[in-house]
Image: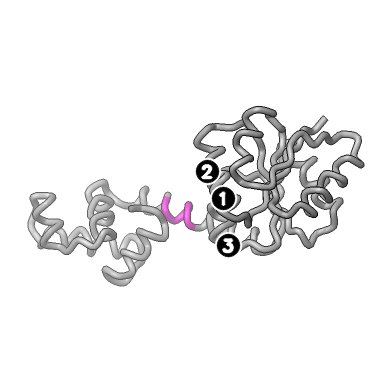
Amino acid sequence: MIRVALADDHPIVLHGLEQLFNLEPDFAVVARCSDASEVLPAVEALKPDILVLDVRMPAMDGLAVMRQLRERQAPVRVVLLTAAIDEEAVVEAMRLGVRGIVLKEMAPQHLVQAIRRVHAGDLVVDNGSVVRALAMVVQKEAASERATRLLTPRELEIVRMVATGQRNKEIAARLAITEGTVKIHLHNTYQKLGVDGRLELMLFAREHQLV
């Protein structure tokens, strides 16, 4: 039996989801939450296997709920149900451990099958924007790993200082080295990362989370 908790601020959607799952012999709806503040207590008290969570809710959105669940290490697999989601939100959701993202425009049975797959351990993210966002995450993480592998510890230290807006003189003073040495390290870093100057380095460091 798949124990499911539902969270959506629209009563009609909540009712419809409950009716949908009640038709499935292997589903049991154990909680209905119309407010984001109800989700964490319900998950901790009722311990559902799956949480079907609306992304857009007043006061606190679905991603904020996921942060709470992660902080409390709640052992529930989250499937986001949304009318639309941008790539940045997808990236954050993936980092927070979401196991599925389903658009509300999809057929109801698509959601049912997605939950079965998530319950079985699969990751269900088949929307185009989700795929693009995942590709972006992979690319960023690969670039970050490459940068960490290519750069020396001192070069990485200088990159992080540059990314926070520090000038060569400040960096030299903090590291007790000359400005000339800072410039040499930066020149080597530019070549290794294939960036053209300080601004590109700052953008690279922030985009690939080297800061």
Q: Is residue 123 visible?
A: no
Against 184, residue 44 (above or below) is above
Against 162, residue 174 (above or below) is above
Q: Nearer the viewer, residue 37 or 130?
A: 37
Circle 3 or circle 2, nearest the eye: 2
The residue located at (65%, 27%) in the rendering is 45
- The earlier-in-sequence mark between 3 and 2 is 2
Q: Position of residue 206 (x, y in %)?
A: 37, 59
The residue located at (44%, 56%) in the rendering is 143
Instruction: Please name the predominant secondary structure of the magenta segment in the image.
Output: helix
Mark 2 = which residue?
A: 67
**Is residue 184 left or right of 163 when viewed as pictured?**
left
Question: Neighbour class for label 3 at 10 Å: few (<14), some, many (≥20)?
Answer: some
SS under mark 1: helix
The N terminus lies in which quarter of the figure? top right
Cα distance between the residues tagged 2 and 1: 6 Å
SS under mark 2: helix
Q: Position of residue 141 (x, y in %)?
A: 47, 52
Query: Identity of the amino acid at label 3?
Result: Glu
Query: Identity of the amino acid at label 2?
Result: Arg
Circle number at residue 87: 3
Residue range in magenta is 140-144
Mark 1 = which residue?
A: 63
Q: Nearer the viewer, residue 113 or 51?
A: 51
- The earlier-in-sequence mark between 1 and 3 is 1
The answer to the question of whether label 1 and label 3 lie on touching residues, with beta carbons closer than 8 A, is no
Question: Neighbour class for label 2 at 10 Å: few (<14), some, many (≥20)?
Answer: some
Question: Neighbour class for label 1 at 10 Å: few (<14), some, many (≥20)?
Answer: many
